Image (tube, helix red, strand yellow):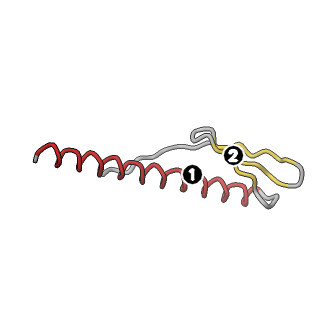
Amino acid sequence: MPARNRKFTFDIVPVGDHLEVTIPEIGVTVATAGTTRREAIDAGHRAIIEHLMQQRRQTRKSRRRASQQHQASAS
C-alpha cells in the first residue's frame, strides 16, 4: 500500500496558564499541561496518531465484517 501524505493544521491558542491545540482536519481540541509550543505540538501529534489508529481499527473491522458476510452468502 503506498504511503499517503496528509497535512494537518495546528492552531495553538494560549488559554489561562496553558495552551490549547486545535486540529481542524480531525475536529479535535487538546489542552496541554504546559505552556511551551513544543508541548502543544507533541499533544497535537498524539491526538493525530490516536485518530489515525481509530480509523485503521474501524477499517479492519468493516473489512472483516464484509469478508464474513461474503463467506456466509457463498455457503
Among the two numbered marks 1 and 2 on one chain, the one whose residue lies closer to the N terminus? 2
Label 1 CA crowd tier, 10 Å (few <14, some 14–19, many 20+)? some
Label 2 CA crowd tier, 10 Å (few <14, some 14–19, many 20+)? some
Q: Amino acid at mark 2?
A: Thr
- Which quadrant of the structure image shows residue 37? bottom right
Q: Position of residue 34 (x, y in %)?
A: 80, 61
* Observer-nearest of 68 and 39: 68
Q: Is residue 40 left or right of residue 27?
A: right
* Observer-nearest of 67 and 52: 67
Residue sitting at x 33%, y 50%: 2
Tell me the tag on residue 65. none
Residue sitting at x 57%, y 39%: 25
Q: Is residue 40 above or below residue 13?
A: below
Q: Secondary structure at mark 1?
A: helix
Residue on which disc 2 sits: 29
Tell me the tag on residue 48. 1
Residue furthest right in the image: 16
* Observer-nearest of 27 and 72: 72
Q: Position of residue 8 (x, y in %)?
A: 57, 44
Q: Amino acid at mark 1?
A: Ile
- Mark 1 to mark 2 CA distance (whole Å): 11 Å
Q: Is residue 49 left or right of residue 14?
A: left
Q: Position of residue 22 (x, y in %)?
A: 69, 44
- Which quadrant of the structure image shows residue 42? bottom right
Q: Secondary structure at mark 2?
A: strand
